[in-house]
């Protein structure tokens, strides 16, 4: 993302008006972005944060925290005074002490407020994706969200998503794992998978962690994200070790399988689960 500076900051940095006009792009009243390329929606949104001296909220705050699944559509700024509140995407709102924090150079609503705001803006799947990444980053806890539910906008959505989550389950390990958990719900009668399952030999020797598994069926899932491109040999050896130790069936799916071909992937998973249901549960060796 390009550097964003107010006119006052440009002056302090010694940027003359001619230099500003030549090398900077006006993104909002009194706020400029370095370079002349077209701005992203996120850059325009953050320029409004600086212009109004407000705090990013909703999708923009979620993007600042790096929460998964959330797309920035435009400015979303909360202000506590009348300054700039008539601008598109800017609204006046009362906030309690501690509801605002700095992320880099930008003020934004704290993670809990951000998650509560998101619940009234996005659908169940996107909110779940954001939730899992917020938990993984240790930005919020399930307990904090549950305590904040009474009276919250989007409370019904949050309750629906939390009800699908196995009690005490760890966060998913990645957005790809979250998407696979969501996809697995298409399989009739299939319980939610166990996450980050640790595999040991009968002797107690550690073998590996597997992304997702149904130990009661003898099935595990390995997911190859974009970061797995350079380690196919390691992945194959790991899969062989887990299969040899447990006798479980393995389903291996890529980012493209889950993201771009979900219907086909659901059918493949259904076949794997049907195969597991037909055979006796293997015993560890």
Image: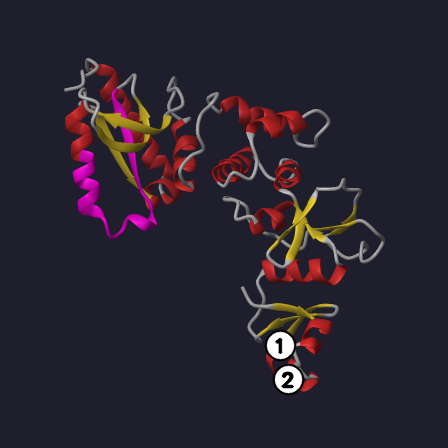
Q: Closest to the observer: 144 or 190?
A: 144
Q: Give the range drawn in magenta.
A: 218-239
Label 1: which secondary element: strand
Q: Is residue 271 visible?
A: no
Looking at the image, the residue that sits furthest to the front is 204
**Residue name at image x 32 percent, y 42 percent:** 257
Give the image location of residue 265, x and y in percent.
Answer: 32, 35
Looking at the image, the residue that sits furthest to the right is 82
Q: Does the magenta stretch include residue 232?
A: yes
Give the image location of residue 136, x and y in percent.
Answer: 47, 38
Residue under label 2, please give it. 19
Is residue 238 rendered to the left or right of residue 28? left
What is the quadrant of residue 148 in the picture? top right
Whether tag 1 and tag 2 are in contact, CB under 8 A, the answer is yes
Give the image location of residue 270, x and y in percent.
Answer: 31, 26
Q: Does the magenta stretch include residue 140?
A: no
Assess disc 2: are there few (<14), some (14-19) or many (≥20) residues with their C-alpha within 10 Å of its C-alpha.
Answer: few
Give the image location of residue 145, x and y in percent.
Answer: 61, 29
Label 2: which secondary element: helix
How many dots with numbers? 2
Distance between the Cα atoms at labels 1 and 2? 8 Å
Sequence-first disc among 1 and 2 = 2
Is residue 199 rendered to the left or right of residue 170? left
Residue under label 1, please give it. 24
Quadrant of the drawing holding the N terminus? bottom right
Is residue 131 rendered to the left or right of residue 18? left
Quadrant of the drawing holding the C terminus? top left
């Amino acid at each position: 993302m390009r550097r964003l500076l107010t006119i006052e900051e440009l002056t302090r940095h010694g940027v003359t008006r001619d230099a500003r006009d030549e090398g900077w792009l006006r993104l909002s009243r009194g706020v400029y972005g370095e370079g002349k390329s077209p701005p992203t929606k996120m850059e325009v949104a953050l320029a409004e944060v600086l212009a109004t001296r407000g705090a990013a909220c909703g999708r923009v705050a979620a993007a600042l925290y790096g929460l998964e699944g959330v797309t920035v559509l435009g400015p979303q700024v909360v202000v506590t005074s009348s300054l700039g509140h008539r601008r598109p995407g800017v609204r006046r709102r009362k906030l309690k002490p501690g509801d605002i924090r700095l992320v880099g150079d930008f003020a934004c609503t704290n993670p809990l407020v951000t998650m509560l705001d998101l619940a009234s803006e996005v659908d169940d799947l996107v909110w779940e994706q954001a939730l899992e990444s917020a938990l993984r980053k240790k930005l919020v806890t399930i307990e904090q969200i549950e305590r904040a539910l009474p009276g919250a906008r989007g409370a019904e959505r949050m309750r629906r998503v939390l009800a699908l989550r196995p009690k005490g389950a760890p966060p998913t390990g990645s957005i790809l794992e979250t998407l696979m958990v969501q996809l697995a719900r298409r399989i009739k009668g299939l319980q939610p998978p166990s996450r980050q399952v640790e595999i040991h030999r009968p002797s107690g020797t550690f073998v590996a962690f597997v992304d997702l598994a149904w130990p009661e069926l003898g099935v595990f899932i390995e997911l190859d994200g974009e970061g797995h491109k350079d380690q196919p040999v390691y992945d194959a050896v790991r899969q062989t070790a887990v299969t040899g130790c447990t006798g479980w069936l393995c389903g291996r799916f890529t980012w493209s399988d889950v993201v771009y071909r979900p219907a086909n992937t659901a059918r493949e998973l259904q076949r794997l689960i049907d195969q597991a249901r037909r055979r006796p549960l293997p015993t560890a060796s």
